[in-house]
Amino acid sequence: TRRSSDLDALLYQCCAKINPSPDLNNLQDSVSAASSWARCWNGRFAPMKTKALAIGPSIQHAWEEVPIIIENSAIEILTTHKHLGVLLSNDLKWTQHVNSVLTNGRKRSGLLRHMAHDLPTAVITKLYLYYVRPSFEYASSVWYGAIPADQSLALERVQASVARRILKAPWRTPKCELLQQLDWPALPDGEEPY
């Protein structure tokens, strides 16, 4: 007999705002059907790896009263979940995702700022555009237009700090001037935020 393997899947259920309980029953039916299907194909969904993100306070409350079960275990409810590289939050805000992007961008750009002393501008520019910038742009069409100005400014500051180090420009040099000298595009929304 073949050993069963853990499967990956995504199930979603839209619930009524006023009375989500019947919809959660439908979700339980869907989870049970998916588990049965997996067993038929010699697979399984690992209960410890199965998580749920309940969006909205009424759904969260209903889920606590009637938990969704998989393989005799209640599915853990999360407040955030990373899906395809994007950190989704149960309050539908992008703060935690942007913080994650900033942390990653700062780590990567810190390395480039140190390398800028020893490498030509053209090399550092390419490294920035291929190594750091993609972390700011990944799935940005989903989240960038929905973030507040202070988060957008924080992303701009990371880019500007690398540009200043490459150009050895004074701290007060305007960001638009730095980008123009390096021929770097504006950040993900496509508009000129400077």
Image (cartoon, rainbow, N blue to C red):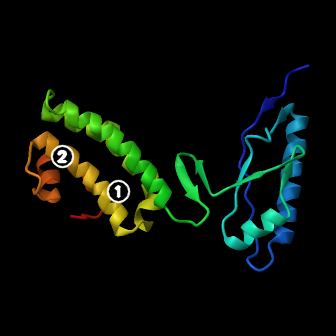
Is 86 left or right of 158, judged from the image as shown? right
Amino acid type, residue under disc 1 in the picture:
Pro
Q: Which residue is drawn at 32% across and 55% down?
A: 155
- Binning the other alpha carbons within 10 Å of mark 2 as few (below 14), some (14 to 19) or many (20 upward) gives many
Q: In which quarter of the image is the C terminus?
A: bottom left
Q: Residue at x 24, y 63 (%)?
A: 192
Pointer 2 residue: 163
- Binning the other alpha carbons within 10 Å of mark 1 as few (below 14), some (14 to 19) or many (20 upward) gives some
Is 1 left or right of 150, judged from the image as shown? right
> Residue 36: where, in percent of width, then height?
90, 43
Amino acid type, residue under disc 2 in the picture:
Ala
> Residue 158: where, in percent of width, then height?
28, 50
Using the rendered view, name the quadrant where residue 17 is placed: bottom right
**Dot label at residue 50:** none
Pointer 1 residue: 188
Is 187 left or right of 122, judged from the image as shown? right
Q: In this view, does 161 lie above or below 114?
A: below
Furthest-bottom residue in this view: 18
Q: Which residue is drawn at 66% across and 65% down?
A: 55
**Circles 1 and 2 in contact, beta carbons < 8 Å:** no
Badge 2 element:
helix
Q: Quadrant of the N terminus?
A: top right
Separation (CA) of disc 1 from disc 2: 17 Å
Query: Is any part of residue 187 visible from this angle?
Result: no
Query: Which is more N-terminal, label 2 or label 1?
Result: 2
> Residue 72: where, in percent of width, then height?
90, 45
Using the rendered view, name the quadrant where residue 126 is placed: top left
Q: Which residue is drawn at 89% across and 50% down?
A: 32
Is 171 left or right of 71, judged from the image as shown? left
> Residue 3: where, in percent of width, then height?
85, 23
Using the rendered view, name the quadrant where residue 157 is placed: bottom left
1 vs 2, front mark: 2
